[in-house]
Image: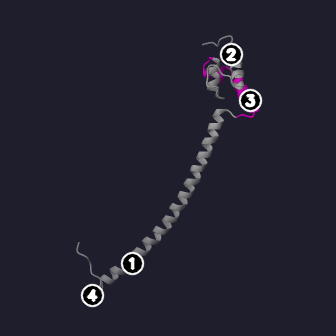
Amino acid sequence: MSPAPDERDRIRAAMERILQGTPQYSSGALTIVALAEEAGVPRNALTQRHPDLKNDFYAQVRARGQMPDSEIRLRKQIVKLKELRAKDATELAQLRADVDHLVRAVNQLTAENRQLRGALSQPSSPVRALPP
């Protein structure tokens, strides 16, 4: 499918409307999807046929001191992932400490068990085995 002859002009006009905050056919989000919707072209027209216009759109967004919506979403996701990673690190440290405590408890119980078995093997032992 070949592009319409006025496709680039429609994309430029859509860029202006979105950047001015007056979109007519889209949500006005600072994304390629909204730009394509506003221009009435498929998204791949911007990513494949007119990547220069896509790059120009993002450059204009950044020049105005704004971030594209996709970048804002990614930055929020990065913050959430860093918080999750910190929480996981705290939990891992607690689990490692728990392992040390459990190893000590197992060693102590093993020593007590050996001591009781030794006492049980003595004929005059006050320790008695429970019936099974």
Residue displayed at 25% across by 76% down: 130
For the record, the magenta segment spans: 40-66
Sequence-first disc among 3 and 1: 3
Residue 44: x and y in percent read 61, 22
Q: Where does the N terminus fall, quadrant-wise?
A: top right
Left or right of 90: which side holds 22? right
Inspect the image, locate mark 3, and give the three-letter code of the amino acid beneath it.
Ala
Q: Residue furthest left?
A: 131
Which of disc 4 and disc 3 is earlier in sequence? Answer: 3
Gap between marks 4 and 1, in whole Å?
19 Å
Name which residue type carries label 4: Pro
Q: Nearer the viewer, mark 3 or mark 4?
A: 3
- Relative depth, front residue between 42 and 122: 42
Q: CA distance from mark 3 to mark 4?
A: 91 Å
Q: Which residue is label 3 attached to? A: 59
Of callouts 3 and 2, the N-terminal one: 2
Mark 2 residue type: Arg
Residue 32 lies, in percent from the top left, at 64, 26
Secondary structure under the numbered disc 3 in the rendered image? helix
Residue picked out by circle 4: 123
- Which numbered disc flags the more N-terminal residue, 2 or 1? 2
Judged from this view, the residue extending furthest toward the right is 63
Label 3 neighbour load within 10 Å: few <14, some 14-19, many 20+: some
